[in-house]
Image (cartoon, helix red, strand yellow):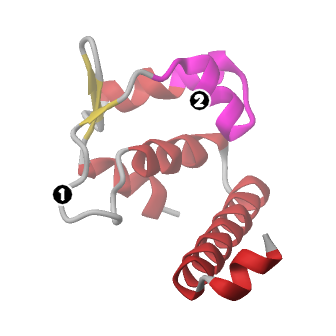
């Protein structure tokens, strides 16, 4: 790997860029876990899955993801995820009927103190 990193500059640049972005994401996740409520962590995770802020047009429908998987991602229980998903649905932040659709109004949960 070291030989390839020295020999292939384009690969090396891409690899270092990937590692730095991965490190930033891990730091953001740690800060999120330490300072935000499970409700905010769920909202942030849903927005990340929908790729808000990463693409000009975020995904409207998310790939199938279970509440149990979301609970593991944010460090809480499935019942808490279920509670917040129902709350988000009632407030019009998300919609699910066969697939999960995230509306940009969910940003208000993350941005609100």
How busy is the neighbourhood of tag 1: few (under 14 within 10 Å), some, or many (20 plus)? few
Q: Are marks 1 and 2 in contact (CB under 8 Å)?
A: no
Label 1 or label 2, whichever comes before in sequence order: 1
The residue carrying mark 2 is 70
Between 14 and 55, which is closer to the camera in this rendering?
14
The x and y percentages for residue 36 are 67, 55
Task: Say what secondary structure mark 2 lies in.
Answer: helix
Q: Residue at x 66, y 48 (%)?
A: 37
Identify the image quadrant of residue 31: bottom right
Residue closest to the far left: 57
Q: Residue at x 52, y 83 (%)?
A: 10
| Residue for badge 1 | 57
Is 74 on the left-hand or right-hand side of 42? right
Seen from the viewer's position, the closer of residues 88 and 66 is: 66
If the image is split into quadrants, where does the N terminus sit? bottom right
Q: Secondary structure at mark 1?
A: loop
In the rendered structure, does residue 4 fall within the stretch colored magenta? Answer: no
| Majority secondary structure of magenta residues | helix
Q: Position of residue 96 (x, y in %)?
A: 28, 19
């Amino acid at each position: 790997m070291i030989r390839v990193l020295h020999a292939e500059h384009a690969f090396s640049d891409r690899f270092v860029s990937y590692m730095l972005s991965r490190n930033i994401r891990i730091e953001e996740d740690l800060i999120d876990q330490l300072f935000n409520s499970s409700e905010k962590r769920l909202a942030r995770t849903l927005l990340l899955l929908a790729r808000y802020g990463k693409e000009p047009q975020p995904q409207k429908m998310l790939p199938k993801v279970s509440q149990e998987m979301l609970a593991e991602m944010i460090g809480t229980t499935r019942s808490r995820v279920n509670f917040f998903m129902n709350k988000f649905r009632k407030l019009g932040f998300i919609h699910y009927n066969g697939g999960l659709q995230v509306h940009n109004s969910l940003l208000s949960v993350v941005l609100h103190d």
